[in-house]
Image (cartoon, rainbow, N blue to C red):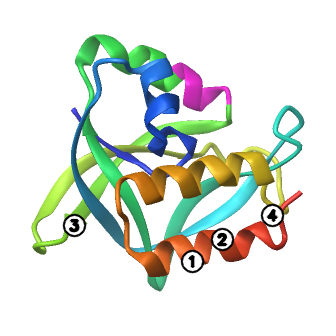
Amino acid sequence: MLYFAYTARIAPAQMAEVAPGAEFRFIAHLPQWTITFPIYDEEWNGGLPSVEPADGQTVWGAVFEIPDVELEALHAAEAAEQRVPVTTEAMDRMGKRHEVLLHRHDGSGDGEYAPSGPYLGLMVAGSRHWELPIGWIAGLEEHLATAK
């Protein structure tokens, strides 16, 4: 299963904790989606990310091949952060579309929170590791200015 990672799971060590057999395939983006921080997490002391459709926006991430036997652990880790699995299309740098699994906010609660600084730091580190576009990384770093 191809998995689009944009949360802290984009950082190699974070992915390895829940899916040690995950193999990086390529970077891609979700055209017409945006990143939000609708989940408040006390452990992380701030908002955690999700994605939602939004005209004119894009969300970058890393695509991994996840062994079927490790999907349950991945789903559990994301569910602990109030995200549910959904299938959508991501576009690679060559313009090819791929069906991917991702996790997004489960819809519980109501709000937009200042991002968790430590969590966002993992997202920035993972984005740098996989060499996502510098504009995307700069945008994440701008969120750090409002992070808790």
**Label 2 to label 3, Cα distance in Å?**
23 Å
Relative to 1, does residue 136 appear above or below in the rendering?
Answer: below
Q: Which mark is residue 112?
A: 4
Q: Which quarter of the rendered picture does the C terminus lie within?
A: bottom right
- Pointers 2 and 3 in contact (C-beta within 8 Å): no
The image quarter in which residue 37 lies? bottom right
Instruction: Say whether disc 4 or disc 2 marks the residue closer to the N-terminus.
Output: 4
Residue 77 part of the magenta segment = yes
Residue occupied by mark 2 = 141
Relative to 9, does residue 54 appear above or below in the rendering?
Answer: below
The amino acid sitting under disc 4 is Glu
The secondary element bearing badge 1 is classed as helix
Q: Which mark is residue 138?
A: 1
Q: Which residues are magenta?
A: 76-80
Q: Nearer the viewer, mark 4 or mark 1?
A: 1
The amino acid sitting under disc 1 is Ala
Work out whether residue 44 or residue 121 is closer to the camera in this orientation and state it: 121
Residue 3, x across and y down, in percent:
31, 40
The amino acid sitting under disc 3 is Met
Residue at position x 46%, y 85% from top? 55
Residue occupied by mark 3 = 91
